[in-house]
Amino acid sequence: RKYMALPKNGYTQFFVSFLKHPLIDVHLNVDFFKLRKDIPKDATIIYTGPVDYYFADQGYEPLEYRSINFHIERLMNYGFYQPNSVVNYPGPEVDFTRIVEYKHFLNQEIPHTVIVKETTTDEGDPYYPVLNDKNMALFQKYKILAEKEKGVHFVGRLANYKYFDMDAAILNALQYYDEHFGKGIKSAEVQADAPWLAMK
């Protein structure tokens, strides 16, 4: 990629602007699986959680995910900690995988800085799929179940068991909308590799 971009005011405001829409209600601390039985049978569901969680009662093994622990450091009167917003550490020399310095984003000009060191773990919230042969074969079983589930649309990284950068995640949602709900109105004229449930 030659260029990368962020929303003008950051991703927080980007999503807040969506959630302020009068047709959107936000309910926090709600377990989908506890209220699932109360959802009308003819309702349309956009499911973005882990696909194996949705079909946990089918008897298949769970898929594996990688999670992250975030270690925040606040450095006063430090200038910049590193030359770029994200620096990866793929070797065994340190126990973290990357450092993110947020001051680089949105051209912030302040004397202090905040860095976040990320360490990988197999416990906690699912962030990344573990794309080995065993998991990919198991995912194909879940994919068949998902394709047969009427009224439910499986969208996004966890539901597709596929890694998306943020731009690809947004593109996936737009393409999926165009294919399944757009009624001839295209949200974006774009080309990209589509996941298994996106536009072909």
Image (tube, grey):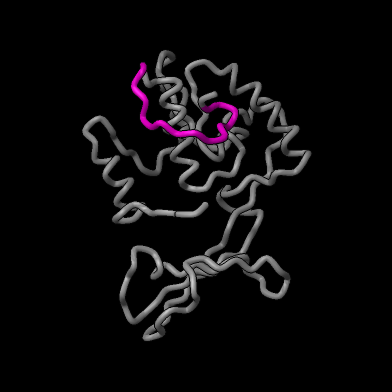
> In the orientation shown, which residue stands out farthest toward the left?
22
User: Which image quarter: residue 174?
Assistant: top left
User: Which image quarter: residue 196?
Assistant: top right
Give the side of residue 110 with respect to residue 149, left or right. left
User: Residue 178: x percent and y percent?
Assistant: 41, 24
Q: Which residue is more in the foreground, 32 or 98?
A: 98
> In the orientation shown, which residue stands out farthest toward the top?
42
> In the orientation shown, which residue stands out farthest toward the right?
133
User: Residue 44: x percent and y percent?
Assistant: 41, 20
Q: Quadrant of the C terminus?
A: top right
In terms of secondary structure, what is the magenta stretch mainly? loop
User: Residue placed at 31% from the left, 38% from the top?
Assistant: 26
Label count reads: 0
| Magenta stretch: includes residue 190 | yes
Q: Which residues are magenta?
A: 183-198
User: Residue placed at 29% from the left, 56% from the top?
Assistant: 9
User: Residue 122: x percent and y percent?
Assistant: 66, 54
User: Which image quarter: residue 131?
Assistant: top right
Q: Is residue 138 above or below residue 148?
A: below
Q: Which residue is more in the foreground, 123 or 141?
A: 141
Q: Is residue 148 above or below residue 15?
A: above
User: Residue placed at 25% from the left, 30% from the top?
Assistant: 23
Give the side of residue 5 with respect to residue 8, left or right. right
User: Residue 147: x percent and y percent?
Assistant: 59, 20
Give the side of residue 112 with respect to residue 136, left or right. left
User: Residue placed at 34% from the left, 55% from the top?
Assistant: 10
